[in-house]
Image: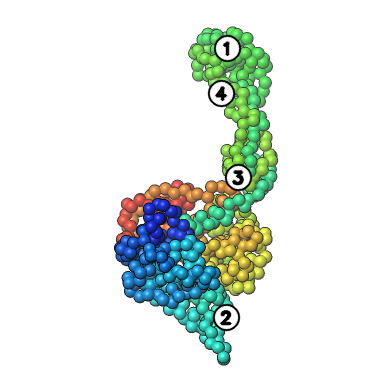
Amino acid sequence: MSDIAEIKVYILTVSDRCSRNEAIDKSGPKLEERLKQWDSRVKIKRGCVPDEAKLIRSTIDAEYKEQNLILTTGGTGLAKRDVTVSAITPMFDKPATGISTALISQTMANTPFALLSNPIAGVKGDCFIVCMPGSAKAVMEYMDILCPVLSHILDIIADNKVPVTTLHATMTSDANTNTTSSNNVHVCPHKSGKINNIERQREHGTAYRARKSEWPMLNVDTALEIIKKEATGKTTAKVLKLDTSPLVRNLRDTPFGCIVRSDVIATEDVPNYRASIKDGYAVHSADGPGVYDVICVSEMGKSPSIRQLKPGQISRVTTGAPVPEGADAVVQVEDTELVLAAEDGEERQIRIQSRVSPGTDIRPIGSDISKGDILLPKGTKIKSAEIGLLASQGITDITVNTKPRVTLLSTGDELVTLDTDQLQYGQVRDCNSYTLSHLLQEDGFAAVNFKHIPDTYEDTLHFLEDVTSTSDVIISTGGVSMGETDHIKTVLRDLKAKIHFGRVFMKPGKPTTFATLPNGTLYFGLPGNPVSTMVTYKLFVLPALKSWHGESPRAQTIPIEIPETRFLDPRPEYIRAVYNKGITGGQCSSRLLSMRDANLLLQLPPRSEHQTSIEKGTVVDAMVIGSL
């Protein structure tokens, strides 16, 4: 079932007591949990009926045409009410006796009571049906036996010739190479572990490489949940210093763009004096309109020559300047007129033309920031305004979350540097490393290491062994697909990395790979086509970097009317577009021009039997990837 969007499964619990809500169904949820672990594409529907043969048969009849797989639990024993087996067996177009026998014989190793169960399996139409006992423990044991061969069974029933033929050829090849003169023994790949594509090619040649990916395709949401879980909680504390010069010399050494590790507390009142909001005159509000002597001037950065104003006196003040004691309001200069000026041009008398109330146009002490206030809460991302707040308090040392150390790896024999004068036949300039490096910079991160290596297993292995201990996140481009020189997954496995997924149900970017190395380093294997690299960076790598750093990984999405009618792909597709302008031309994953000026990824659904195209004007979600 390698290339379908979803695997439809119906789980039927057969139990008198569960159907009457007198008991809790434990085996049905266990089956659902195990199926989701087996393949993220499963779409599960559940039902529950009493131990009645007619109800069991009618339920199967109603569901089998819509499902790829039906699993029943309960009613396979020897009690009088155990009628599942007798109800379903006559419905099979073809019984799967070998599978039934295997389920009993292999569970016998765990308990002799397995003999009392009577599991059956068979095919009805295009649906595979397995009847299991009602024990939660038993169904998990059965699923452990079924899961390694379940995809192959469903491929056979669905007549998916390519994966079936490929596996059979693989098994035949293995059988021919695992014989002795006295005993011909077939070694099935399902029992001998994962097929090592590199070893197969070395031993038999490229013609016998694996032709079907062993990796199920996860949907994007499931992949993101795995990434978020692996990346969260990785950051540590670091003290960074705000430079006494406002000029930014090295972003890596400043707190700009970092996440505050703990609350930053204000140490001073702002303002720390009563400040005038406007240019005008400090007055006693009770004096009212009239002609007054200007007895002093208060300017920014200077103390007024007279600190205390008496009733009947006024002081000229500039915006932001201290308001002399005694004054309780400021009259803006627009509400006054000159009465008398001195020979040196200074004001001597001014007529106040308007009445003001106490507090007019005065900023009280601490009105902007009070000492002891939380200046920057824990989790705040430090941007321009936050830098200004820190500077206003004279705070130079800030404890922040560390950012991940990112290593970039570019793979491919065909790649050459950008300063290559003349491309030879088959050569390509390496643009992905430059694109990724600047994407990281745009998003507030930086690559600390980079290397280009040829497409060999040994070079890939040695490089990862060298950089893993000094990297928090490794991003490679190329080497993750099905080609004979794609070694990334093999190397990761040999390094004992946990490969969380090796394919994603999307376009572009299907071969995207995510793993965690034994020391905790996160590894992203991105496809080599430049558009695939950029799209998968935005979808998967950036959320990981943000989660690692302590930021919210959620991308901004907006509703957009699709500007033209488009045929749908079998996979969900991410179409590049410019806000209010339209789609950026051809959407081939090698065409980097489609990313030029693009600030949206339009998220189109996969093609289905009910929908093969999407009409112009249909509203879809669009992921924002640039300034709108």
Residue type at the position of mark 3:
Ile
Which one is earlier in the sequence, the residue at label 1 or at label 2?
A: 2
Mark 4 lies on a secondary structure that is loop
Residue 598 lies, in percent from the top left, at 45, 54
The structure residue drawn at horizontal position 38% and vertical position 65%, both measured from the top left corner, is 80
The answer to whether residue 591 shows anywhere in this view is no
Residue 13 lies, in percent from the top left, at 40, 60
Which residue bears the numbered disc 3?
259
Compare residues 334 and 572 and report the one nearer the observer: 572
Compare residues 253 and 150 and report the one nearer the observer: 150
Image quadrant of residue 451? bottom right
Mark 2 lies on a secondary structure that is helix
Numbered disc in front, either 3 or 4:
3
Which one is earlier in the sequence, the residue at label 2 or at label 4?
A: 2
| Cα–Cα span, label 1 and label 3 | 47 Å
What mark, if any, has residue 277 been given in the picture?
Answer: 4
Q: Is residue 166 left or right of residue 270?
A: left
The single residue placed furthest to the front in the displayed view is: 80
Numbered disc in front, either 2 or 4:
2
Residue type at the position of mark 2:
Arg
If the image is split into quadrants, where does the N terminus sit? bottom left
The structure residue drawn at horizontal position 55% and vertical position 22%, both measured from the top left corner, is 278
Q: Is residue 477 left or right of residue 70?
A: right
Which residue bears the numbered disc 2?
202
Residue 36 lies, in percent from the top left, at 47, 61
| Cα–Cα span, label 2 and label 3 | 49 Å
Which residue bears the numbered disc 1?
284
| Cα–Cα span, label 1 and label 2 | 95 Å
| Cα–Cα span, label 1 and label 4 | 16 Å
Image quadrant of residue 377? top right
